[in-house]
Image (spheres, helix red, strand yellow):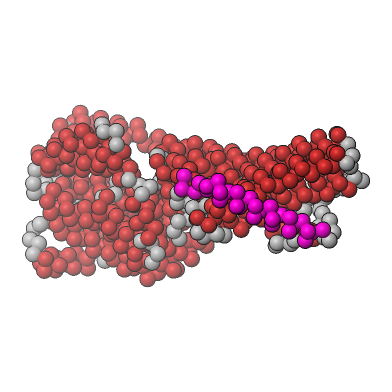
Amino acid sequence: MELLKRMLLPVIMLLLAAGFWSSPQFQQIAAGVAIFLFGMLSLERGFQTFSGGIVEHILKRSTRTTARALGFGVLATTLMQSSSLVSVLTISFLSAGLMNLSAGLGVIFGANLGTTTGAWLIAGFGLSIKLSQLAMPMLVFGVMLLFQPSQTRAGIGHILAGTGFLFLGIDYMKDGFASLQSGLDLAAFTSSGILSLVIYTFFGAIATVIMQSSHATLVLTLTALAAGHVGYSDALALAIGANIGTTVTAVIGSLGASIAGKQLALGHLMFNMITAAAALILMPVLMWLVDNLAAVLGIATDNYTLKLALFHTLFNLLGVLIMVPRMGWLKDWLEQRLPQPAADFRQPQFLTDAAMSTPVAAVTVTRQESTHLYNLTSALMVRGLGWDNEEFRRGQPLALLNNQQRDTGSEALQQSYEQDIKGIYSAIISYISQAREHTTGLYDEQLRELRAANYHLVEAIKATKHLQRNLMHYLHGRNRNMADAYQQLRERIAETLRAVEDIRHIQDPMESRLALDHQLLLLQRNAEDADSLIENLIRSHAITPLMATSLMTDKGYCTTACHCLLQAARYLFIDEQQPQAQADDSLQLESDELSAINKTLQADSQAGSKDQQGEKRP
């Protein structure tokens, strides 16, 4: 596709240069199209400034049913006058797993229907008044707001300036066609019957592919129709072609998307192609229906621009009526044609370029991928500590877990890290770096914290790898005191892993934060107890000084691994809607509370020690 665009660019530039040379009126029309497209880009950028907030919130709440999804598609496209922006939002949400395929199809179908409101506005008002008079104040105020430091004001400035450029572009095109008496005359290509419809449908599709905007094609058609340079039936075919051309934009937008995003793009293509085919086949019926509805609505017989807007609405409504009852069939067909590939858990599962289009989707897929990395990390650490992952995952008591390996060294753990962890970690860090170029405020802070979470996971693996060097040696050695001490170290990491799993399933953010703080205090208490144990073993000559040095070092690695796991859990599993840096200020425990908690932990620890005196070590 990129090669095709590079090949087409010089051809288009040459054709435009020839047109500029041969006709001043063509210059004005082409300038109008360029200004209109620039206005659409500015308008989209303005609305994207507010993405990551109310737009995404409404989108998530408005896609729970097909009817709501359709309504959102219509309303959002009506307000933003950009089905492309709505499509990008939908593909990014679908790629992030924030909506299902049925809801995404509903939004796209509604967006197609929402595009018809622009035709009504232009046909009803844009061609009957001097839009440049409205454009100039919008451009002045919009540009003034663009230079404001506030992101919100700059976003409003983009919207005002974009609307002003839209109006100015329409006015240029209208004046260009009005003054065009010879030269470019699309009516010269008119033939008879179905051939004429096919030719103009093709023209409409090509124009939309080149301009990447069905709105621009429709405005060009309306202004040419108003000036008499294209016939009414041919203008209807151009409108159908514009709808077909938008599918190319959807396909291009899905190239960096997940399989779900590609399924949505194919569904969009199916909708537009079926709608276009039905409109062409039923053209006489639709034209008859337009004439009768125009009479009912008080539209004059020769007001072809309003009748074109009515036709545009009717044939898109026809597509909705045809496809919505077949939504289930279409969803199943898309999933069969583009099935989800078999998951390779050594590769990133959720990171897609399409999700980077909106901050909330970028944060969502980053969190999903980071959770995937946590699952791989915990499995690797359990395996590195010498246990079976399946038994550990099922909740088998630690004392009953079977030892799976006795001689596995840190080299095996390093190899597993290289194969299973490093590639995903690198992909996440790279993705976060790119995503943060387009995010600010809340979402930027969340991405920064997710980056920290992934760093802590890697540090936990490194600490476990260092611990493993002595773990298996002393765990199965002759010195029973060293074996018991190292058993306690690996049990401490295992208990932390299971505590994190419990925290993941706590719904209340306040409760989960307190549970995590409890684990941090418990970790501190265990570290102090380990220091006392080592001192007692040294005094009683139960271990050699060399053993004591190894044990003290590995106790530090154990504490580091547990602390890193808890810090990663803080950023990954507690209150996904709010950065933890903001929440920490509201969770500062008083010194009396800390003292009380420490006493409780100490009492629990002593009681637990008594209960475990009779247990047999594995």
Q: Residue furthest right?
A: 478
Q: Which picture quadrant has residue 610?
A: bottom right
Q: Residue furthest front?
A: 592
Between 575 and 288, the one lying in front of the other is 575
Percent coordinates x, y for residue 87 in the rendering: 36, 52
Percent coordinates x, y for residue 131 in the rendering: 12, 43
- The quarter of the picture where the C terminus appears is bottom right
Percent coordinates x, y for residue 221 in the rendering: 20, 48
- The quarter of the picture where the N terminus appears is top left
Question: What residue range appears in magenta?
Answer: 585-613
The residue under the point 36% across, 49% down is 53
Between 181 and 272, the one lying in front of the other is 272
The residue under the point 73% across, 55% down is 606
**Most common SS among magenta residues:** helix
- Residue 271 makes an appearance in the image: no
Q: Is residue 481 above or below residue 304?
A: above
Q: Is residue 401 above or below residue 2?
A: below
Between 269 and 618, the one lying in front of the other is 618
The residue under the point 32% across, 59% down is 72
> Would you say 533 lies left or right of 34 here?
right
Q: Magenta includes 130?
A: no
- Residue 171 makes an appearance in the image: yes
Q: Which picture quadrant has residue 545?
A: top right
Between 415 and 451, the one lying in front of the other is 451
Percent coordinates x, y for residue 347 in the rendering: 61, 46
The residue under the point 8% across, 58% down is 302
> Would you say 543 lies left or right of 75 here?
right
